[in-house]
Image (cartoon, grey):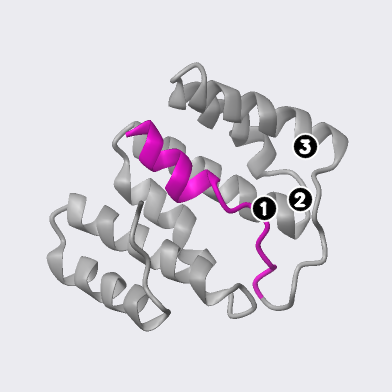
Amino acid sequence: MRVFVCAAFVGTLALPAMSEACTETVFSGSVSEQYMKAEIALIEEDNATKALDITDDLWTADLNCYERQSLRKLRAASFVEINNSAGAIDMLLPLLEDDASPASDRARTAYNIGQLYSNLGEAEKAQHYLEMSDALGGFKPS
C-alpha cells in the first residue's frame, strides 16, 4: 500500500491555489520541519497516526497555497494508511475544484477519489470520479 500512497498522493506537491495560480514553491522554515517529520513518520516509520498527529497542528496554521496543497495530500495518504477512505476523500475533493491546476494532476486526484469510493463500496460515486479522471485526460497508475 505504501507504494500506492507515495505515488498517488505525495508525489506531486506543487499545486496552484484554488482561485488563482499559486506562486509559492517552497515551505517556510517551521512548516518545512514539521512537514518533513510527518512525511518521515508516514513513509519511513510506517506510522500514519503519528503523521496525522504532527499535521494536526499544521492544518490550523496560516499556510501558503503550496504548503496547504502539500499538506492535503500528505494527510490524505495518512488517512488511506489507517483505512479512513472518507477522511482521504475529504482532503482530496478541494484539489479537484482548482481549475488552475494542470488537468493531469486533477485527473490523478479524480482517479484516486474514485478508487477510494470504490473501497467504500460506493460504486456510483466511484464511477463518477473515474469518468471525471478520463475526461481530464485519464490517469493509470504505473
Q: Is residue 21 placed above or below 41 in the rendered structure?
A: below
Counting other residues with Cα less than 10 Å from the Cα at mark 2, is it few (<14), some (14-19), or many (20 or more)? some
The reply, left or right, for residue 79 in relation to residue 50 is left
| Residue 96 in sight in this render | no
Mark 2 vs 3: CB contact within 8 A: yes
Per the rendered image, the range of residues in magenta is 1-18
Q: Is residue 117 placed above or below 10 in the rendered structure?
A: below
- The residue lying at 82 percent from left, 66 percent from top is 23
Mark 1 vs 2: CB contact within 8 A: yes
- The residue lying at 68 percent from left, 78 percent from top is 19
The type of residue carrying mark 1 is Arg
Sequence order check: which comes first, mark 1 or mark 2?
2
Q: Position of residue 59 (x, y in %)?
A: 64, 43
Task: Give the residue at mark 1.
Answer: 68
Counting other residues with Cα less than 10 Å from the Cα at mark 1, is it few (<14), some (14-19), or many (20 or more)? many
The reply, left or right, for residue 71 in relation to residue 49 is right
* Residue 89, image quadrant: bottom left
Total number of numbered discs in the rendering: 3
Sequence order check: which comes first, mark 3 or mark 1?
3
The reply, left or right, for residue 141 in relation to residue 52 is left
| Depth check, front residue: 108 or 124 | 108
The Cα atoms of the two marked residues, 2 and 3, are separated by 8 Å
Counting other residues with Cα less than 10 Å from the Cα at mark 3, is it few (<14), some (14-19), or many (20 or more)? many
What secondary structure is marked by label 2? Answer: loop
Q: Is residue 3 placed above or below 134 in the rendered structure?
A: above
The type of residue carrying mark 3 is Val
| Depth check, front residue: 3 or 31 | 3
Task: Give the residue at mark 3.
Answer: 31
What secondary structure is marked by label 1? Answer: helix
Task: Give the residue at mark 2.
Answer: 63
